[in-house]
Amino acid sequence: MDYYFAPLEGITNYLFRRIHSRHFPGIRKYFAPFISPNQSRKVMTKEMKDLLPENNEGLELVPQILTNSSQGFIDTAKKLIQLGYHQVNLNLGCPSGTVVAKHKGAGFLADPDALDRFLDQIFQSTDMEISVKTRLGMADGDEFYRLLDIYNQYPIAELIIHPRIREDYYKFHPRMNYFDYAADHSKNILCYNGDLFSCEDCRMFSEKYPKIDRIMAGRGLLMDPGMVWKLTQKDAPMGQEREKIVDFHNELYEAYRQVMSGERSVLFKMKEVWSYMIASFPGNEKNMKKIKKASSLADYEAAVGQIFRS
């Protein structure tokens, strides 16, 4: 089984990826938070810095593009080729209201004819592998039947399916009957994404779908950064997961202090990380509230220290 780390905007930047890979090996591919080409068809400096090869040494990183403009996709792909990338991912899954309102991400799925034309243009004009991350549709799972017919027309490197419609956001259970249909009818290699929050979740999926050899986790790997490490490393010392997370946190925290200006920026970033990672330290609701309320790094360190000592 190959394990992929899904991108989460604002959290899984190059510092996070690099430090995570050192402490928790086993991730086959990291996917970068999406690039959204602007009207001038330029990629923002901040986004490009995150993708620079020197910032991602030792990782197999896949950039992700969020757009409904075929020319914007093609132009951005050319820039990525110049950086040495050989694969790019098309984001057709983001359910954010601001994204969907612009007919991007999951919003693009509402117009399958336009999506078909878009895919035809980018596959004809892009000299690199293209994978696709998709939802089932906008408002009805049955939209997926048409979408899969479209995807089957193109040589997609990997079709990553999050089996929810856009209106589900991240609520309810994934609609696995549609993934079952894809497993039987897709002409492209499939990767599963959705609600993999523990090692047991991953094992159960593997048992049910023995022919699917790649899965992507996002929120689960933020809740338990060592999840894939425990699944893939035969010499992973059981019982030391928390110590590993402590070391991971400390290096990440120090890295942000070195590169970010001002306590407020560091606090904001670490509070985002803890909104997920607290799941690895159950029973610390009061200390988590202290982290949320922390207005200085001293307050933050005190609250985190209490969690780690517990």
Image (cartoon, grey):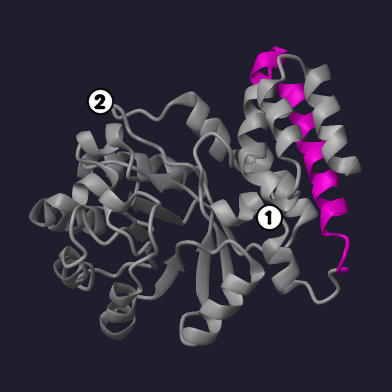
- Residue at 61% across / 34% down in the picture? 272
Any magenta on residue 1?
no
Instruction: Name the kind of residue labelled 2 in the image.
Output: Gln
- Residue at 54% across / 64% down in the picture? 196
- Residue at 26% across / 62% down in the picture? 136
Q: Position of residue 292 (x, y in %)?
A: 66, 26
Task: Quickly name the residue at label 2.
Answer: 39
Q: Position of residue 46 (x, y in %)?
A: 51, 26
**Which of the 4 image quadrants contains residue 67?**
top left
Dominant SS in magenta: helix
Any magenta on residue 257?
yes
* Residue positioned most to the right: 309
User: Alpha carbon of mark 1 to alpha carbon of mark 2: how far?
Assistant: 38 Å
Q: Nearer the viewer, mark 1 or mark 2?
A: 1
**Which of the 4 image quadrants contains residue 269?**
top right
Task: Quickly name the residue at label 1.
Answer: 224
Residue in front for this viewpoint, 225 or 5:
225
The range drawn in magenta is 237-266
Q: Residues within 10 Å of mark 1 (few under 14, many from 20)?
A: many
